Image (cartoon, rainbow, N blue to C red):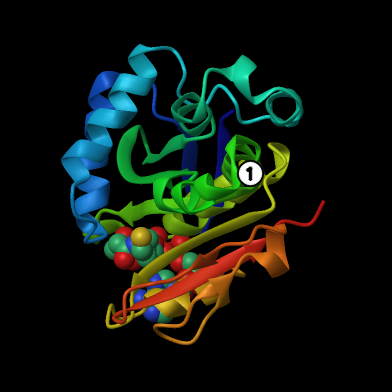
Amino acid sequence: MTQAQNSGGLTVEVRPASSKAELREFQRWHRLCGVPRGRRAARNLLHANDAGILSTGLSRDYAASARRDASAVGGISMVRAARTMALIASVNGRVVGGLAGGPSIHLVSQLAVLGPEAVVQGALATIKIHALAVLPGHHGRGIGRALLGEALRIAKESGARIVYGQFDTDAAGTAAFFHRCGMSLCAPGLPVDLRAWAELPVVVAPLPSETLFHWAVAH
Ligand SMILES: CC(C)(COP(=O)(O)OP(=O)(O)OC[C@H]1O[C@@H](n2cnc3c(N)ncnc32)[C@H](O)[C@@H]1OP(=O)(O)O)[C@@H](O)C(=O)NCCC(=O)NCCS
């Protein structure tokens, strides 16, 4: 699952993080996004990778089998890890950006009251972009777009219904970035009702200082 993209003469390669060192770097990608507990997030990616689960469920076949029999896939932690992607972007062999995305624990927890089937359905239908960051010296060269584009391609391939995330409303240029990349933006501080997009009785609510973006996957 590698992808080479050319942007203004620059070759950007996007691929899944494969080594422990690359997965540890997700602490940095989370930090650059201002996401708290980035160290824990990176550790979770490492654990899922060590257990051989990370990103193993990003296909329609997996989604279909998990939908049929949720118990056969090992429970919700397993589904979340299997549907989580950790992508890195490199230019001339140097890693310059990363993206982590997958089902949000907050979202699936909201569905718990409806039972295990709803939880699994939520985990299969949604991909939250937990972190997307490019090293400051490399902004504006198409690297963020390449990372997000690959995440959207994987989301579509895996049968997800919606990709979403949030950013700090005051972060200069971030709204323009997501808009230019084809994301729908909510007004700052306003929620997204997933009933409309993924038939899930869940509302994703940002902090008052955040703005949500989303992309409905066309199948
Ligand atoms: C947001 C971020 C990932 C963008 O990455 P990037 O590699 O600089 O963006 P790209 O070069 O791929 O830009 C893609 C498009 O967005 C536009 N864009 C990017 N940054 C922009 C800015 N600051 N102002 C206006 N437009 C911007 C580009 O002009 C480009 O548009 P075009 O191709 O239609 O001309 C990067 O700025 C970053 O790492 N920010 C810190 C972390 C963060 O806030 N992440 C988002 C929330 S998790």
Where residue 199 appears, as percent x and y from the top left, is: 72, 59
Q: Nearer the viewer, residue 118 or 7?
A: 118
Residue drawn at 70 percent across, 31 percent down: 63
Where residue 219 appears, as percent x and y from the top left, is: 82, 51
What quarter of the picture does the N terminus occupy? top right
Q: Residue under label 1, please give it.
A: 118
Mark 1, Cα crowd under 10 Å, few <14 / some 14-19 / many 20+, is some
The residue most toward the top is 51
Where residue 130 appears, as percent x and y from the top left, is: 38, 51
Q: Is residue 110 visible?
A: yes
In the displayed structure, 72 sits above or below 215; it is above
Where residue 58 appears, as percent x and y from the top left, is: 61, 31
In-image side of 134 versus 111 (left or right): left
In the displayed structure, 171 sits above or below 160; it is below
Amino acid at the residue labelled 1:
Ala
Residue drawn at 46 percent across, 72 percent down: 212
Q: Nearer the viewer, residue 129 or 105?
A: 105
Q: Nearer the viewer, residue 92 or 148?
A: 148
Q: Which of the 4 image quarters holds residue 51? A: top left
In-image side of 10 versus 91 (left or right): right
Q: Is residue 9 visible?
A: no
In the displayed structure, 135 sits above or below 28; it is below
Q: Quadrant of ligand 1?
A: bottom left
Q: SS class of the residue under badge 1? A: helix
Residue drawn at 37 percent across, 19 percent down: 49
In the displayed structure, 168 sits above or below 64; it is below
